Image (spheres, grey):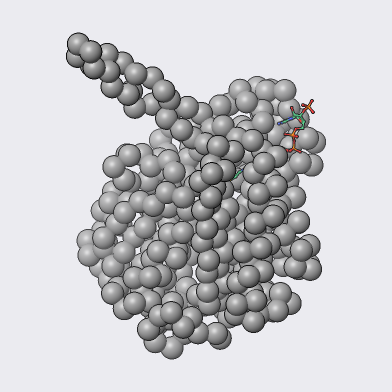
Amino acid sequence: MIRNSQWDLGISFVGCGSAMPHKVITNDQLGQRVDTNDEWIKSRTGIGERRVIGENESLIELATEAAFDAIKMADWDVKTIDLIILATSTPEDLFGSAPKIQSNLGASNAVAFDLTAACSGFLFALVTASQYLGSGAMKRAVVIGADQLSKWVDWDDRKTCVLFGDGAGAVAIESSENESGLVGYDLKSDGSKGGCLNLSQSNIFLDLVQGVTHQKGEYLPIQMEGKEVYKFAVKEVPIILGELLDKYQINSECIDWLLLHQANQRILDAVASRFSIPSEKVLSNLRHYGNTSAATIPLMLDEAVRDQRIKSGDLIACSGFGAGLSWGAALFYWHGPH
Ligand code: ACO
């Protein structure tokens, strides 16, 4: 394995988990609400159905369950966890939802905070947690990606509502003297193109006192220029992944799994073809869940680890991309429980 030279310690991926809402909405059901159909959605995106958080469910509960599964797989005592990062753009509390998850888990020695980078959020959070572990400042971290975009989608806008779903996934990572699971990473932002994809606050100002107004706390539904986001993804993801492979002198043939943010099957196929990665090595569960934003990568990882496609020692090429605009890539070896 290739050692990441930036750190004193290596990072080992030892657990994963996921949790999904119960309610499934099929393409045909969406077609009863907006002018769309199963054939259009499947052929343009690969999505067949998505799940949406309903009554008696919550994002914090799903995130807690996903984290709990990852901790269980890692066989950790919760009291030994140092750090919990929740990547989300849809917290239940704008002050942060991670502390509630920490308390649900009983991880009383962990510091917990939210991190927002839209669909790149999980990757950004993974790299952030790795800094603490690699430097030796902390030993064990749980990184969660969880989103409830169904709250913020305009369900009457067929251009966006067909794409998104809710869900949560998590990984358990720890610092390691012997192993180096995270080979390398790169993260990028380009705020100048941020207008392509927004969940921005509304511009409503209300009278406060005589001569003073204040801005009402309220958000508009997701706005997206789909074609621009598509072009951005198929251009930038191959560049960032290619640079990473070059940097660590890894031939794309050595990649066991391509694990991309699950936004659109056509994006997955285009990136895979750029590296001549055969379709059997491209992980996709878009058909069942759609784009669950920060959750897609750990959710897909968990599915492929639990059905034993991903085995200990497999090299995974991972990339996330989305609003911001933001994007990133990481090369890592899955280790699994000791
Ligand atoms: N059903 C039927 N027809 C539709 C639908 C729909 N759901 N949506 C759009 N159309 C129509 C359009 O109105 C248009 O019709 P027109 O030609 O008569 O005007 C036609 O289909 C083509 O529309 P396009 O927008 O050009 O379709 P495109 O092939 O670009 O596919 C899509 C749209 C699927 C959104 C694609 O652009 C895409 O996947 N983009 C990337 C989006 C993405 O990944 N976003 C998430 C980023 S992650 C994050 O940070 C949240």
- Answer with left or right where residue 116 lies relative to residue 106: right
Ligand 1 shown in quarter: top right
Residue at image point 39% right, 87% down: 177
Pinpoint residue 302: horizontal percent, then vertical percent.
54, 62
Corner quadrant of residue 218:
top left
Pinpoint residue 131: horizontal percent, then vertical percent.
38, 70
Quarter of the image with the N terminus is: bottom right
Residue, far left: 209
Q: Is residue 299 visible?
A: no
Q: Is residue 43 above or below residue 262?
A: above
- Answer with left or right where residue 334 lies relative to residue 264: left
Residue at image point 29% right, 42% down: 95
Looking at the rendered structure, the number of numbered marks drawn on it comes to: 0
Seen from the viewer's position, the closer of residues 145 and 182 is: 182
Corner quadrant of residue 245:
bottom right
Residue at image point 43% right, 59% down: 125
Pinpoint residue 19: horizontal percent, then vertical percent.
48, 51
- Answer with left or right where residue 71 lies relative to residue 290: left
Seen from the viewer's position, the closer of residues 285 and 157 is: 157
Pinpoint residue 217: horizontal percent, then vertical percent.
34, 27
Seen from the viewer's position, the closer of residues 254 and 41 is: 254
Q: Is residue 224 visible?
A: yes
Q: Is residue 137 above or below residue 296?
A: below
Residue, far top: 210
- Answer with left or right where residue 1 lies relative to residue 127: right
Residue at image point 28% right, 22% down: 214
Corner quadrant of residue 175:
bottom left
